[in-house]
Image (spheres, grey):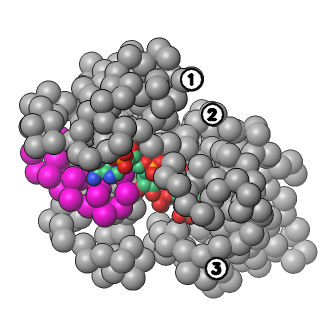
Amino acid sequence: MKNIAIIGASGYTGAQITALIDNDTSLSIQGLYVSENSLDKGKALAELYPAYQQIKLSLSPLTADAKQSIVEEADGVVLATDHAVSLELAAYFYKQGLAVFDLSGAYRFADIEQYPKWYGFEHTQQDVLAEAVYGLAEWNHQQIAGSKMIAVPGCYPTASLTALKPLTPYLTDAYPVINAVSGVTGAGRKAQLHTSFCEVSLTPYGVLGHRHQPEIATHLGQEVIFTPHLGNFKRGILATITVQLAKGTTEADIAKAYQVYNDSPLVSVLQNQFPKVDDVVNTPNCIVGWKYDSQSNYLVVASAIDNLMKGAASQGLQCIKIHFGL
Ligand SMILES: NC(=O)C1=CN([C@@H]2O[C@H](COP(=O)(O)OP(=O)(O)OC[C@H]3O[C@@H](n4cnc5c(N)ncnc54)[C@H](OP(=O)(O)O)[C@@H]3O)[C@@H](O)[C@H]2O)C=CC1
Ligand SMILES: CC(=O)N[C@@H](CCC(=O)OP(=O)(O)O)C(=O)O
């Protein structure tokens, strides 16, 4: 039994991973935490999320004493916090010997130079960053098992990389073009004008400048064009990707490449059939559907996940279980 502390537990991803860990017999919850001055400190999680009546835990402020208790009692810590908050907390807990599962983007680039440009801060934790591994669960099993600093991937990168990584032998200089639509929970629980009910309407954002473009490119080893869209639904992501593959690539090559997921129970691959967001919402699954034109070598592949599950919390749980060998 491994004991896990969850920081940022009142947020969308934090509450989701709390529910998953609470339901897992090989794990226990050391505590649920919010910021020291949080308006939610002291409240039961079920007061914020009545669907989680079975969870009898309250949200504690992350004081110095609370951090000390986490270090003494927990085996691992989940950070479901903003990138800048995770940056410091991850380094603190990692240096105290805990396994850190960070849902933010603070440790996803090995190259320290990327952070000011994409995250707006200088990365102050070079030594810890050097130990960080990318928690793309179906691809990086060994690294996740071997490091105590795990950067769980972003939601769009999870959908995109799951579809594209098997195809790397067939990619050329032509950039894959990724158009992805996310539900509004992708932006987190805090109030913001652009995510308020009357403002949300399908639209692209972050065009040619979203931080997930370099995250996808880094972990694919190939530049991409990435355009996210905000959709007027709560949960889920559909990434539809168009890419021209190397001349001579056959349908059989692609089918064979996707066999890499034959032993991955959470990833399903369909040929000439495409997933809907509703097929994956509230599940840890990724469904990939593809169709290929062997005349032009153009492939269209669509990948659907739940942003809060495979895009954050359930992939975080996969990382925890891989890391601890559960
Ligand atoms: N939403 C999504 O689909 C995905 C999100 N992510 C990433 O996961 C992380 C969490 O996202 P999300 O759940 O959406 O965010 P939310 O805004 O919903 O939740 C953030 C949580 O962090 C807490 N918090 C804020 N400041 C501190 C602090 N200083 N110390 C401790 N807790 C703090 C908040 O509570 P309070 O302010 O009351 O203290 C809240 O519990 C982010 O880095 C995000 O980029 C990754 C993949 C997908
Ligand atoms: C709809 C929406 O706003 N989505 C978020 C991505 C959420 C995610 O994956 O988070 P990371 O910040 O951890 O990379 C965005 O575009 O910023």
Residue 131 against residue 178 in the figure, above or below: above
- Could you say which disc has been placed on residue 70 in the image? none
The residue lying toward the viewer, choosing from 231 and 242, is 231
The residue lying toward the viewer, choosing from 70 and 252, is 70
Alpha carbons under labels 2 and 3: distance apart: 29 Å
Label 3 residue SS: loop
Amino acid type assigned to the residue bearing label 2 in the image: Thr
Label 1 residue SS: helix
Residue 208: x %, y % from top left: 61, 82
Residue 223: x %, y % from top left: 56, 79
- Could you say which disc has been placed on residue 51 in the image? 1
Residue 231 against residue 124 in the figure, above or below: above
Label 2 residue SS: loop
Amino acid type assigned to the residue bearing label 1 in the image: Ala
- Name the quarter where the C terminus is drawn: top left
Residue under label 3: 207
Give the residue drawn at x 41%, y 38%.
Answer: 10
Amino acid type assigned to the residue bearing label 3 in the image: Val
The residue lying toward the viewer, choosing from 159 and 232, is 232
Q: Tell me which numbered mark, 2 or 3, is placed earlier along the sequence.
A: 3
Q: Which residues are magenta?
A: 80-98
- Could you say which disc has been placed on residue 283 in the image? 2
Residue 112 against residue 52 in the figure, above or below: below
The residue lying toward the viewer, choosing from 243 and 207, is 207
Left or right of residue 205: residue 53: left
Whether residues under marks 2 and 3 lie with C-beta atoms below 8 angstroms apart, the answer is no
Q: Is residue 90 magenta?
A: yes
Mark 2: few, some, or many residues within 10 Å (few <14, many ≥20)? some
Left or right of residue 218: residue 186: right
Q: Tell me which numbered mark, 3 or 1, is placed earlier along the sequence.
A: 1
